[in-house]
Image (spheres, rainbow, N blue to C red):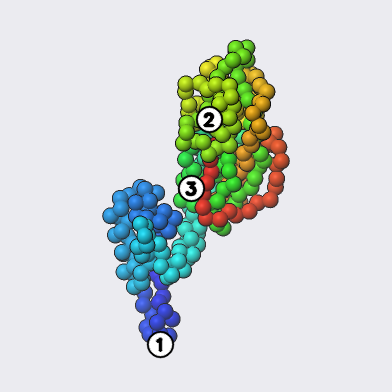
């Protein structure tokens, strides 16, 4: 429980009023600030909207001040709520640091690291290189989370994340470093017929640079009667000879059954490859070992850079 002394808020001569708050109430404030609605906050916390509303009311009752207000179709923080939000972020970071300390090395076991990335990066880039990490860190438990959804480091959904766009989550709570550029090229099954159709992404994925490039090529040469929403599926379709597509070079060049094709439909796309780490975990041995392994694995990427910087508070990772 956190105790807050209220002297100075109204009158210096006034007695200090102690308001007891549960840390969970502050978590609900952070969730509403990020989501902008009760529904979004409830989804991120895995509870219902009624619970979010009740916990916010409890927080306001404990503080004697309004922290959120309705604006338009959503919720926004009051001026006091925004000031409180900065303190809530510090509290969250400290709680995560305590959790990290509790999970630190005890008796030779390095502990667990949760690493998140899209399925193709996990399956086609990290898994083949896993043997070197197992040799270097035999006491480490690694959880590989292959999801297209961007997991939140700040909410503890992952310790390390790999993103294919400049990350914007985290403020001072997350460290981010660009590892390099993910170059794309055209590939097809080795020995397949030369008139293979292009396989691309469904229309909702058209914002991806590689999806747009595939669409240009398909408009000129013909498209397969199939589309996907995940690059791992695209990779398997090409490996099975159902068509040709654009893949990251680090993936396509490593697959013996694939051959690179010329691409004559404009410039080939590329994506930025970023590494993100929760700031309070960066000094832990298990985190250091996994970060070093990721950096070695992705060393072939062009334009590798070194500076580390905290991103701002939005989040926009991406599919490979």
Q: Which mark is residue 231?
A: 2
Q: Position of residue 275 (x, y in %)?
A: 60, 44
Query: Tag 2, which secondary structure?
Result: helix
Q: Earlier in the sequence, mark 3 or mark 2?
A: 3
* Residue depth check, mark 1 versus mark 2: number of the one nearer the observer: 2
Counting from the top left corner in percent of width and height, residue 209 is at 58, 37
What is the number of the mark on residue 13?
A: 1
Q: CA distance from mark 1 to mark 2?
A: 65 Å
In the foreground, 202 or 78: 202
Earlier residue among tags 3 and 1: 1
Residue under circle 3? 152
Quadrant of the frame with the C terminus: top right
Q: Nearer the viewer, mark 3 or mark 1?
A: 3
The spot of residue 15 in percent (x, y) is 37, 83
Who is closer to the viewer here, 69 or 172?
69
The answer to whether residue 139 shows anywhere in this view is no
Q: Is residue 188 left or right of residue 55?
A: right
Figure check: 185 above or below 9: above
Left or right, residue 275 beside residue 202: right
User: At 63% across and 41% down in the image, what residue appears?
Assistant: 272
């Amino acid at each position: 429980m956190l105790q807050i002394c209220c002297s100075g808020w109204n009158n210096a001569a006034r007695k200090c009023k102690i308001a007891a708050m549960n840390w969970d109430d502050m978590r609900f404030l952070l969730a509403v600030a990020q989501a902008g609605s009760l529904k979004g906050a409830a989804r991120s916390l895995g509870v219902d909207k009624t619970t979010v509303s009740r916990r916010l009311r409890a927080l306001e009752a404990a503080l004697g001040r309004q922290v959120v207000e309705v604006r338009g179709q959503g919720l926004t923080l009051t001026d006091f709520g925004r000031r409180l939000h900065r303190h809530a972020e510090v509290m969250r970071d400290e709680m995560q640091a305590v959790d990290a300390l509790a999970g630190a090395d005890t008796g030779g076991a390095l502990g667990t690291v949760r690493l998140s990335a899209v399925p193709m990066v996990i399956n086609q880039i990290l898994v083949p290189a896993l043997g070197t990490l197992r040799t270097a860190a035999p006491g480490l438990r690694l959880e590989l989370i292959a999801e297209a959804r961007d997991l939140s480091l700040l909410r503890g959904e992952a310790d390390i994340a790999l993103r294919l766009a400049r990350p914007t989550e985290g403020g001072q709570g997350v460290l981010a470093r660009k590892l390099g550029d993910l170059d794309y090229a055209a590939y097809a099954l080795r020995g397949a017929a030369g008139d293979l159709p292009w396989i691309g992404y469904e229309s909702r994925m058209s914002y991806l640079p590689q999806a747009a490039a595939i669409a240009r090529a398909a408009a000129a040469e013909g498209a397969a009667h199939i589309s996907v929403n995940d690059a791992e599926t695209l990779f398997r379709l090409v490996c099975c000879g159902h068509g040709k597509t654009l893949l990251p070079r680090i993936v396509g060049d490593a697959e013996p059954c694939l051959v690179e094709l010329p691409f004559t439909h404009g410039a080939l796309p590329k994506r930025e490859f970023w590494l993100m780490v929760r700031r309070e975990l960066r000094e832990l041995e298990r985190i250091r070992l996994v970060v070093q392994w990721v950096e070695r694995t992705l060393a072939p990427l062009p334009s590798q850079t070194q500076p580390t910087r905290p991103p701002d508070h939005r989040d926009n990772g991406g599919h490979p």
